[in-house]
Image (cartoon, helix red, strand yellow):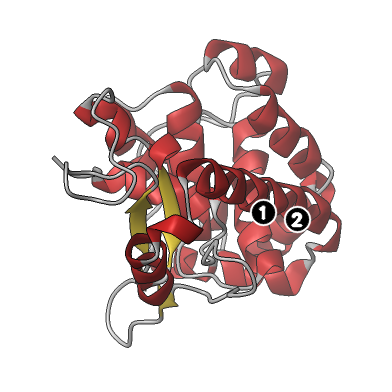
């Protein structure tokens, strides 16, 4: 077995697209000349994937080994280091490293919402211009707290949503300004997120995993923290005002 693609996407989102190794800070996104950008990181196993691998734990199931909780987001060089120099990188140390790195990414995102302005929003949703308008869905208002409960989201996601709602006025003003130039802009914006949302639901994703996969979708191809946060701000704007999430 190996970690699934959605699991790797979740890991990349929680890691901010940055190698978790101390002092590395390398952005692990390849900016493609044609097509979508892609992550070039490795989903390294904390407790080894196979019996001869570093830190292998025979008591774990294959599902546990390949879960996002047992993976750490690393560049190729640092993945090699933690496995080749196993004595320096025991399980507990890597678990602490993963926890600290992901917490820092989460905190940085919450703080960055206040810096989201029109340039960041323009960068984050530049893809909308080539998107066809939505054929279904609505902009009926549903209280965010109700959606949070129905989607069984964690306190961590609740905090991201609460922080993102502080950018709502900026996102709404940006959407309104774009609508003056392109009357279909709101429907184009909604269409891209709805298509991904329904595709993920059709594959069985739900709850916390679905929310984080949608956040990753909103950040795709972006490297600057403020741009990535702007993408999530747009998602949260839609989370509040339309059916991008289950009502």
Q: Is residue 174 above or below residue 120?
A: above
Q: Is 128 above or below relative to 244?
A: below
Question: Residue 237: where, in percent of width, then height?
Answer: 67, 42
Give residue 179's position: percent from left, percent from top: 64, 60
Residue annotated with mark 1: 105
Q: Taking the image as drawn, is residue 200 in sight?
A: yes
Q: Percent x, y for residue 123?
A: 60, 73
User: Are there few (<14), some (14-19), or many (20+) residues within 10 Å of tag 2?
Assistant: some
Residue at image coords 50%, 34%: 211
Q: Give whichever of 149, 5 is nearer the camera.
A: 5
Q: Quadrant of residue 226?
A: bottom right
Q: Is residue 61 above or below residue 73?
A: above
Q: Which mark is residue 108?
A: 2
The one nearer the camera, 165 or 7, is 7
Residue at the location (34% across, 69% down)?
80
Q: Nearer the viewer, residue 64 or 168?
A: 64
Position above or below: 14 against 194: below
Q: Specify whether 104 is left or right of 126.
A: right
**Image position of 5 (left or right of 153):** left
Residue at coordinates 71% horizontally, 52% vertically from top-left?
104
Secondary structure at numbered mark 2:
helix
């Amino acid at each position: 077995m190996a970690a699934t693609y959605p699991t790797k996407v979740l890991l990349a989102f929680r890691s901010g697209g940055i190698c978790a190794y101390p002092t590395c800070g390398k952005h692990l996104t390849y900016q493609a000349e044609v097509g979508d950008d892609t992550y070039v990181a490795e989903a390294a196993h904390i407790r080894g994937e196979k019996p001869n691998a570093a830190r292998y734990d025979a008591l774990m199931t294959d599902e546990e080994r390949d879960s996002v909780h047992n993976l750490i987001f690393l560049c190729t060089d640092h993945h090699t280091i933690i496995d080749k120099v196993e004595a320096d990188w025991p399980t507990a140390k890597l678990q602490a490293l993963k926890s600290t790195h992901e917490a820092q990414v989460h905190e940085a995102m919450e703080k960055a919402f206040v810096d989201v302005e029109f340039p960041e929003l323009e960068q984050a949703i530049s893809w909308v211009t080539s998107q066809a308008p939505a054929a279904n869905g609505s902009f009926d208002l549903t209280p965010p707290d109700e959606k949070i409960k129905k989607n069984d989201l964690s306190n961590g996601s609740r905090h991201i949503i609460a922080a993102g709602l502080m950018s709502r006025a900026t996102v709404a003003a940006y959407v309104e300004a774009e609508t003056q130039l392109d009357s279909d802009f709101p429907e184009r914006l909604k269409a891209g997120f709805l298509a991904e949302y329904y595709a993920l639901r059709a594959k069985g994703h739900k709850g916390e995993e679905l929310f984080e996969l949608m956040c990753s979708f909103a950040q795709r191809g972006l490297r600057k923290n403020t741009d990535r946060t702007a993408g999530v701000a747009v998602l949260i704007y839609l989370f509040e005002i339309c059916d991008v999430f289950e009502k």
